Image: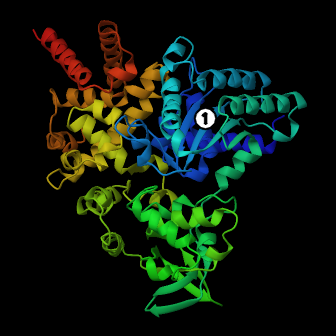
Amino acid sequence: MPSNAQTLIMRIFDAWKAENLPAAEGSTAFEVFASELALRPFDLGLENIESGIVGGGQDGAIDSVYVFFDDALLDEDSDVVSPESRPTDFGQDRNLELWVIQAKRTPSFSEDAIEKLELTMSRLLDLSQPLSSLSILYNSSLLTRFELFRSAWEKLITRRPRISVNVVYAAPGDTRNITPQLEAKLHTLEQSIQNAIPDTERVVTQLLGDKEMMARYNERPPYTLAMSYQESATSGQSHVALVKLRDYYNLIVDENGRLRRHLFEWNVRDYQGNVSVNQEIRSTLTAQDGPEFWWLNNGVTLLCSEATSTSKTYSLSNIQIVNGLQTSHEIYEALRNPGAAEAEERMLLVRIIVTGDAVTRDQVIRATNRQTAITDASLRATDAVQRNIEDYFLTHGWYYDRRKGYYKNDGKDPSKIISIQFLGASITAMGLARPDKARGKPSSLLKNDDDYKLVFNSDIDLQIYLWAAKLQRRVDGFILSEAAEATVPQKSNLKFHLSMLIAEKLNSGPIRRPQQLRRLALKGADVSDAEIGEIFSNLKQWAAAYLKREGVILERATKAQRFSEYLLACVKAERENSTP
């Protein structure tokens, strides 16, 4: 008889699947579900979770893989793995994390699964063995995800990264009833990883059972927190306060000593590492005989919906720290290390702005981030076109997440939350006939001004954005379904190419400008499941012929514009041949 915890977590999964991935295979959906729970502290969106799924054949008992650098999820477009970047572009002693997850719907944990994991991990972490030599054993998606970690590891080795490896085995079983033999195999797995990465700071193997999964599912990041202060001035509902660094540190760090990344989701910058500004902040923090810290630092700005004060302690609701990420990181690094007692007593200037108005929030974000040089690319979320897209989505019951995490934290349906990156990739694939760019450079749209303006501008009807987002979501669901009969590499690499071909079919020809989608969007053009299946079947055949002819793997082909143009040529040839 299954326990109540087992029954409940599987009922929760069934409801989650119906809401988020109704067409996906049960095993694939559970891999996504379990991975989201395992990575709950990182608060990733659905598309980010899906990007790490590698299970389904030749997976070496690994179902998903994720790599984080300073708590930011890495993809193939990330600077840290770019051939153009240098080790000195990144700060020293930064966190590099590898997360490996196995997810099974079995009611118990298997020793055999852990043995397979150990063998796979030892092979994939062996730097003397090129990953390409393992292609006969493992699928290309798994190898690509480990290539991310190995590339970052080798790039950063001279910067002394703090490496941690986390292996999670998730199943609706009871973690209190595991055998001594299984515990011994977990220990052997840890030792094997430690031997492969001798400079790792931490190796953690974790069983995520029914009760643990229930706890993770019910977990929500706190957005109402307390912050003590020394002195303050108030104007209306907003405040300026002098806060001891110790008290600010307690605000931005959770009970496990990890930076509360969700408080910085609206910040326009990422942490910049060992740049000159941060070096100056660091030296000011650690100088024993220098002026007060707040004399030499601009402080931080946080937005919140409510701030009440009792006994020199603020209770702050719905916090977002929108300026001061570099300062916050340096305070975090300084105070997390032993011997920081003197620094703890120094003061920080904190501006607390209470507002619920979205336009005002955007104005504050822009104004407070003009004090030092910053590219317009970093301020994308505050653009008028982004606000207009968000408003249009809301009128149709969808949610455009231009402020990362906003709607997820508000409890909205995750299947209807669309990120800037997802929408940009969808328009790039369907409106520019560049699925190769959507697949190979998922982050570039917010970095490159020319790419951004092609996809996000006021000349494009708002209906186009919603239509493209809905179609891409449907394509994503189809490609994970049993009906697609897709291999793991096809699931990972062909979804944007499929959406391009669907748009091409609906338009009866290639689309080179997003505005060309207007006619389709206005009439709500759609295709049946059978038609999607037929288009995907053709896509798989054409791809197989291309790979054989060019002697390349699917992973590489789908990132090249040449492959995209080849597919369009195949469609054209087929259409001409079928015309009487």
Tell me: 82 left or right of 263: left
- The residue to which callout 1 is attached is 30
Determine whether 553 is above or below 88 in the image: above
- Tell whether 450 sits left or right of 364: left
Place residue 33 in its image quadrant: top right
Residue 435 or residue 459, whichever sits in front: 435
For the C terminus, the quadrant is top left
Q: Secondary structure at mark 1?
A: helix
In the image, residue 334 lies at what x, y percent? 59, 65
* Drawn side of residue 330 relative to residue 537, left or right: right
Residue 61 appearing in the image? no
Look at 53% across and 44% down and name the residue there.
68
Query: Does the rendering let one see residue 506?
Result: yes
Q: Disc 1 marks which amino acid?
A: Phe
Q: Residue furthest front?
A: 289
Image x and y of residue 229, in percent: 59, 84
